[in-house]
Image (spheres, grey):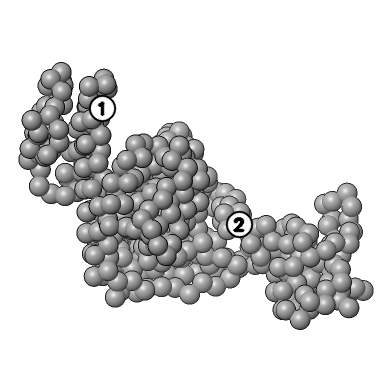
Amino acid sequence: MKSADGCDSLPTNVTPEFDKQRIIYEETEDLAQRIVELEKLLSLAPRHKGAERMVGDYRKKLATLKAQFEKKREQERARRSGSSDEGVIRKEGAGQICLIGVTNSGKSSLINAVTNAEFDVGDYPFTTPIPTPAMLTLEDINIQLVELPGVFEGSNEAGIGRQALSVARNTDCIALVIDLSQDIEQQMRIILGELDAARIRLNKEKSAIRIERVGLGGHMIYGAQNFQGDIEEVKEYLKARRITNIIVRFQKPATFEQLVDAMDSSVAYVRAMIIATKGDAEGSEARFKELEENYSHRFDIIPTSALRKENLDGMSWAFYEHLDILRVYTKIPGKKREDKPIVLPEGSVVEDAARKVHKELFVERFRSAVILRDNDKIRRRTVGLSYPLQDGDVLQLAHR
């Protein structure tokens, strides 16, 4: 005997809760809700050996439903792709930080406090109607701050929200601005929910799954032991999506959701942090503690108060640290070092700096470089092209 959904006969010793949920699932027509109800059903499934086949059938069905849902979402994104570049702000300075928060969370006040901007600060919705940039000067570099319009439930589907989130998905770092005078959990739920709906993943590792397109063949799966679930779900998902000529490598422990993201080229992986504003408000200390307890495992959290001008310098340097960049200063022997640094990604080596200064010809004729470091035991050392750089290095280049 099969259930109404086409699965093999049900074990006789299922719980009343499971049977009730099965009926709810089978009577649900909306695709997204059907997935939710099936996930609930699986959470109630019996764990004994006699139920293994039934659970396996339902897991395959879940993979098929998710494949249908992703295809539907892709079609919807393609339909709206004509305005996908709307509101893009050209990056300037050493890096770009987007500030996102609910209405009146204090984004404008923060930016005004650390830049020369004079953004409107109002106690009403959409004080900032479009993504608006300002420049933060931090010692000898500039960091571009972009205030996004206040986010709200469903903003990903609205024109103003899509415009703002299209900027966020292309930024170097997102700062979640959390108002300590308001409900913490509600703000985080709205912000994270809208970013997730816009296919923006925060502080997630992209390299857990590697997808390779090949010329011929079906699909090959490697590292199945790293998949946190039944590998049959993966096979069923690929089959339902009619995906062939592909190699899936689970390089690190990964979930089904990460597989779906890896298959979707529109997913953006962005570095993120939290700026807790209005630390001067009544009850802010308790709310900050709540924020730390619930989210410090995932985000660095910086407390601030624009009104009292508290920890604004700490916030500015946190922006710098989350850009993952370093500053290198060039110097001609016998002269002072240049005041303006070369800005490079963290992990850069001497060759990267040499190419930025002198392009290809110089690198081919490169002889040596001298690095000067005031904070090092060896303050002057001669190095080669592959030598790693540190923030604040002074570099003298020589060629044949």
Q: Amino acid at mark 1?
A: Glu
For the N terminus, the quadrant is top left
> In the rendered image of this protein, does residue 340 appear above or below residue 110?
below
Q: Secondary structure at mark 2?
A: loop
Residue 285: x, y in percent?
Answer: 46, 36
Question: Within 10 Å of the Cα at label 2, are there few (<14), some (14-19), or many (20+) other Cα atoms?
Answer: some
Q: Secondary structure at mark 1?
A: helix
Q: What residue occupies the far right of the structure in this picture?
A: 334
Residue at mark 2: 324
Residue 170: x, y in percent?
Answer: 45, 65
Q: Quadrant of residue 325?
A: bottom right
Front residue of 380 and 204: 204
Front residue of 247 and 284: 247
Residue at (36, 36) in percent of width and height: 229
Labels 2 and 1: the sequence-earlier one: 1
Mark 2 touches mark 1? (CB < 8 Å): no
Residue at (37, 66) in percent of width and height: 166
Residue at mark 1: 52
Q: Is residue 200 shown to the viewer in this render? A: no
Residue 183: x, y in percent?
Answer: 33, 41
For the C terminus, the quadrant is bottom right
Q: Is residue 131 shown to the viewer in this render? A: yes
Residue 271: x, y in percent?
Answer: 50, 54
Front residue of 329 and 139: 329
Residue at (89, 59) in percent of width and height: 381
> In the rendered image of this protein, does residue 70 appear above or below residue 133?
above
Q: Amino acid at mark 2?
A: Asp
Residue at (44, 73) in percent of width and height: 89
Q: Would residue 142 appear left or right of 180 to someone viewing this image? A: right
| Circle 2 or circle 1, nearest the eye | 1
The alpha-carbon separation of the residues under discs 2 and 1 comes to 47 Å
Question: Within 10 Å of the Cα at label 1, are there few (<14), some (14-19), or many (20+) other Cα atoms?
Answer: some
